[in-house]
Amino acid sequence: MTDFSSMSDDFYINMNLNTEMNLPTSRETVLHYFEQIQKRYPTMRNFYSREGSEFVLEEDKDQGNYRWSSVEEKRVISGYVNPESSEAAFEQHMFALDLVPYSLSISPLDCESLNLMYGFDFTYRGNHNQIVNQALGMPAAFEKLADAEGTRVISNEPAIQIALDEDCRTQCRLSIETRTTAYHVRTGEFPEEQLSVYLTVRKYGSLDANTTFTEALSELRVEAKRLLDDYVIENILEPLKQTIALQ
């Protein structure tokens, strides 16, 4: 089994369930959902709200690895930062998806999209745009512009989105997010920030009849692991890791 945690400084697996209709917001409903989560994972004891419409339950973050879950107006999220294993993260996400039909009245018909995201963060003090270019290169059509006299690249965040089925309802997005700004390039002062790689596999629309949320997530997991093992690790993660290590 692939050890994704060894690919970067921080690693996380998140599940997002987006709905067409607004989720219940009553005190009893929201608390009941999080109480069920806490019974399964007792160390998730930090509960708070943001802007009155987002509710979060999470573990303490000081150990570097922690679980978290949130309920927003039209979205339920389950996340695990630096999980002990991918299996532990998926067990959590599956548990949340088993709960939502009963605790939050979410029907598979109400699914706008179900997302599975693998995130990889590389901590680096330096020009992220330059590192991405060194590690991954740049499309030939852009090279001359980037190398033109008197120019400096201030943003280099390649991304691609592909369909995984004939009707384009299952899609994958691979993107890189840098934190280097024009100010950093201008001053030459680069703080220690995280350069991120995101692989998101997403299923759009209502689920097929007799398909559960957990079954749909299992299908997304198979697709995500295939893309990571066959393409992303060798062509994106390892080159970035090696290039940063050489700086």
Image: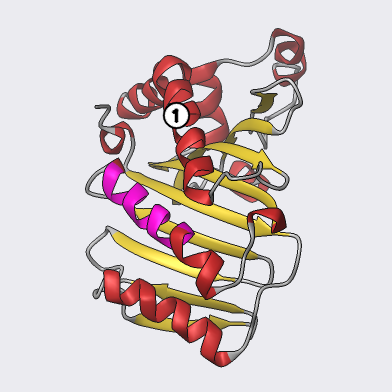
Range shown magenta = 87-97
**Residue at numbered disc 1:** 222
Q: Position of residue 194 (x, y in %)?
A: 45, 47
Q: Which image quadrant for residue 24? A: bottom right
Placement of 111 over or under 55, stated as above or below: above
- Where is residue 126? Give x, y as percent: 46, 39
Residue located 48% across and 42% down the image: 215
Q: Nearer the viewer, residue 116 or 179?
A: 116
Report the amino acid beneath label 1.
Answer: Val
Which residue is outermost to the bottom? 27
Residue at the spot 44% in from the left edge and 21% down from the top edge: 226
User: Residue 62, how many percent across, how many down?
Assistant: 26, 68
The image quadrant that residue 26 belongs to is: bottom right
State the count of labels: 1
Q: Is residue 169 among what the camera can see?
A: yes
- Name the residue rendered at 45%, 38% in the picture: 218
Q: Residue furthest front?
A: 210
Residue count near mark 1 (Cα–Cα under 10 Å), binned few <14, some 14–19, many ≥20: few
Q: Secondary structure at mark 1?
A: helix
223 lies left or right of 82 = right
Image: 85 above or below 95: above
Instruction: Tell me if I can see residue 187 in this picture.
Output: no
Q: Can you name the residue that lies furthest to the top here?
A: 140
Residue 108 is covered by the magenta coloring: no
